[in-house]
Image (tube, grey):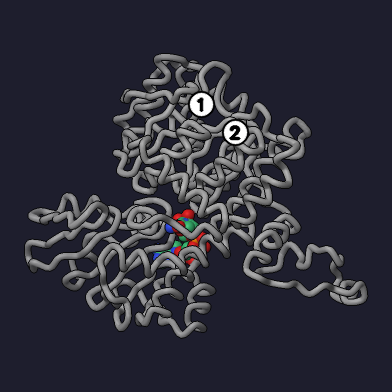
Amino acid sequence: MSLTISKTSCGREYKVKDISQADFGRLEIQLAELEMSGLMSCRAEFGPAQPFQGVRITGSFHMTIQTAVLIETLTALGAEVRWCSCNIFSTQDHAAAAITRDSASVFAWKGETLEEYWWCTERALDWGPGGGPDLIVDDGGDATLLIHEGVKAEEEYQKTGKLVDPTVSHNAEFGIVLEIIREGLLIDPWRYRKMKKRLVGVSEETTTGVKRLYQMQANGTLLFPAINVNDSVTKSKFDNLYGCRHSLPDVVMRATDVMIAGKIAVVCGYGDVGKGCATALKAAGARVIVTEIDPICALQALMEGIQVLTLEDVVSEADIFVTATGNKDIIMIHHMKQMKNNAMVGNMGHFDNEIDIRGLETYPGIKRITIKPQTDRWIFPETNNGIIVLAEGHSMNLGCATGHPSFVMSCSFTNQVIAQIELWKERGTGKYEKKVYVLPKHLAEKVAALHVGKLGAKLTKLTSEQATYISVAVEGPYKPPHYRY
Ligand SMILES: NC(=O)c1ccc[n+]([C@@H]2O[C@H](COP(=O)([O-])OP(=O)(O)OC[C@H]3O[C@@H](n4cnc5c(N)ncnc54)[C@H](O)[C@@H]3O)[C@@H](O)[C@H]2O)c1
């Protein structure tokens, strides 16, 4: 696939929906900056030293207003940036426009096809001569995946002379990935290996991306160091839990105008995201039921007064279904067939494989009515009952709304900036091998410290006697590494 790339007056490449929305984007970015105290502190603290002078950073991350503030923090620290989104529906076009005009190369728009999505990912990784980026900010691991699969295909081609064959993939999207790699191979059979050679490391944002990294570490296939930002407590508890808790009712309202109070809502998965969704739905008056495979998470739900059942137990009675497992094949076509008329089905997990959209698309005689973008009613022929599916099974808070609030994203993104600085600072020292690392606790505490003041908090100071008594230093860290918040 080849799409037309435009250039700004200063020569920056881009493809976005409408660059004339840049002024609107700038106004919202300025609003977000006031909320994102962690990122603004990073600019003040690290900006003067310009730690990213001459550094190329590629991001594969929802191109929202909040991400715009992250990008401009990286550029304020000296980086050159190329960016794509990690979700076909999550781009805020005015954010993409403002960043393109003022700061970085962006390849992203709301409503990409899967082919366009992977084209954008490949564009964001392509820095021209001299290989790819020095660092990657990834959310879900798609940029990392493209490099790994590219290297694999190039090595196979060199060894056997065989080009990668996209038609062997059973997964349509993976077929698109292989096609992009195949096209690249024909032009430059060293493209991804050059990228690998230059790349210092990746910082990964989300549970699902982190899972992929640990799988590669276990298989011995991880090609570069990775920092798991997700498991910094100031990311997982704030973005995954409080972010989802804040966003979910708004998403349901915006998409469907359905009143949550009194309804039966099923949340599949009671990890941080599931907890955030369940708490929000409960607070809005829903009768919440959780499905879980893990008895510990199930027990946590029960202690919150939330029933734990299987999907089969409740599928024909519930009104709202939210998946948040990070797993696949959670709500299948045979479930959706049994749902009540106008039941709402949406996913909060990272990828679109929790809900069986393909099963809907191929169901004989089914009718799809698009009520508005990212809100579809699917009507089953036997019953004439319709279910409302949000964002075609992609993350509903990013597809049907605009993601999490700036404040929680500032917590998450401050960890990202610290991780990027750490990877770059330690390049060549041997501190980071081809493994997955988490940030040390004192940095998570630092991220929290940059945000508590914004909400008017005053922290109590430990006396040295108290510090000795609980075996911590007066200046922290205040908890041992194994402490669970
Ligand atoms: N939409 C967003 O804004 C957003 C934000 C952060 C994370 N995420 C994504 O949300 C997903 C969940 O993240 P998390 O941090 O809560 O993950 P998690 O691993 O902490 O929680 C997932 C839970 O689902 C349970 N589970 C797994 N398979 C299941 C099944 N078949 N049925 C029922 N339960 C099952 C697991 O036991 C676990 O408790 C991930 O894909 C993550 O990347 C989305």
Q: Is residue 461 left or right of residue 38?
A: right
Q: Residue at (76%, 39%) from the top-left corner?
A: 431
Local SS, label 1 = helix
Q: Is the residue marked by circle 2 packed among few (<14), some (14-19), or many (20+) residues within 10 Å?
A: many
Q: Is residue 86 visible?
A: no
Q: Is the residue marked by circle 1 packed among few (<14), some (14-19), or many (20+) residues within 10 Å?
A: many
Q: Residue at (71%, 35%) from the top-left corner?
A: 50
* Image quadrant in which you'd find residue 233: bottom right
Query: Foreground residue, 372 or 270?
Result: 372
The answer for how far apart the CA atoms under marks 2 and 1 are is 9 Å
Local SS, label 2 = loop
Q: Residue at (16%, 59%) from the top-left corner?
A: 378
Q: Quadrant of the N terminus?
A: top left
Q: Which residue is mark 1?
A: 151
Residue contact between numbered discs 2 and 1, judged by CB atoms under 8 Å:
yes
Disc 1 marks which amino acid?
A: Val
- Tag of residue 223: 2
Q: Residue 208, position in %: x, y?
A: 49, 52
Q: Is residue 183 above or below residue 361?
A: above
Q: Residue 464, position in %: x, y?
A: 91, 72
* Image quadrant in which you'd find residue 248: bottom left
Query: Foreground residue, 47 or 464?
Result: 47
Q: Quadrant of the C terminus?
A: bottom right
